[in-house]
Amino acid sequence: TPLWGDLLLAAGLIIIAKLKIREVILRLLVVNSFILLLWIMLPFTFSGEKIYILDSLGVSREGIKYAFLLTIKSNSIILVGIALLSTSSIYNLVHALLHLYLPDKLVQLSFFSYRYIHTIHSEYIRLNNALKVRGFKAQTNFHTYKTYAYLIGMMLVRSYDRSKRVYNAMLCRGFKGKFWTLNHFSFNKSDFIGGIVMISCIIGLMLF
């Protein structure tokens, strides 16, 4: 069926991208943990032929089929996204978004969010380790809630101060709201062949 073809095509892209299977599986587990909710709800709430009766609840054949189709589609989409995004650097992705004529401010916001979320996480780890050195243990009491409130507030203040320093440093280097790239994309023979193969696969899945 076309759905199995989609899944095989997505798996083929993962193989071509030479990604680590363990990392791919871990990412799929995160996504499928949400899809599990569909398997819990759809068979009992979807109308259709009942194949099993559990007290007052009935498991429908159509509900199971629909949950299965959503699982295959979701995993295929996620695998394609992993294959395409994991093989591109953040700079290439930002460059591509600019060529797709997305608003400059939106692209810059996305880039800086990605760039400094790791910095904020490192700051959180440092502050959390400082709390542990001082003997702090998280419990369900007012002192714990107050400590975490101070921790979050300190992270926000330090993030704001860091953003001001980074912005001023960028202004000193001549930043005027636009990213300039030295190496632009170029369309070559391998891109043409790859595009033809992908389009052929997609058309084949749509027809058959």
Image: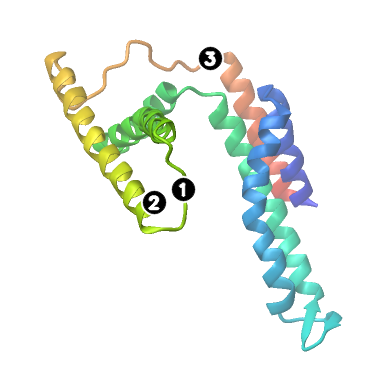
User: Picture quarter containing residue 19?
Assistant: top right
Given the current orientation, which residue lies at the most extreme bottom position?
Answer: 56
Circle 1 sits on which residue? Answer: 138
State the CA–CA distance, disc 1 to disc 3.
57 Å
Work out whether residue 46 can be spotted: no
The image shows residue 10 at horizontal and vertical percentages of 69, 38
Q: Is residue 9 above or below residue 176?
A: below
Q: Nearer the viewer, residue 89 or 201?
A: 89
Mark 3 and mark 2 in contact (Cβ < 8 Å)? no
Q: Nearer the viewer, residue 4 or 205?
A: 4
Mark 2 and mark 1 in contact (Cβ < 8 Å)? yes
State the CA–CA distance, disc 1 to disc 2.
6 Å
Sequence-wise, the earlier of marks 1 and 2 is: 1
The image shows residue 170 at horizontal and vertical percentages of 18, 19
User: Picture quarter containing residue 87?
Assistant: top right
Q: Which mark is residue 188?
A: 3
Q: Secondary structure at mark 1?
A: loop
Q: Residue at x 66, y 64 (%)?
A: 38
Please name the colour scheme applied to the rendered image.
Answer: rainbow
Badge 2 amino acid: Thr
Q: Secondary structure at mark 3?
A: loop
Query: How many residues crowd mark 2 within 10 Å: few (<14), some (14–19), many (20+)?
Result: some
Query: How many residues crowd mark 1 within 10 Å: few (<14), some (14–19), many (20+)?
Result: few
Q: Is residue 104 above or below residue 138?
A: above
Q: Residue at x 69, y 71 (%)?
A: 42
Sequence-wise, the earlier of marks 1 and 3 is: 1
Circle 2 sits on which residue? Answer: 144
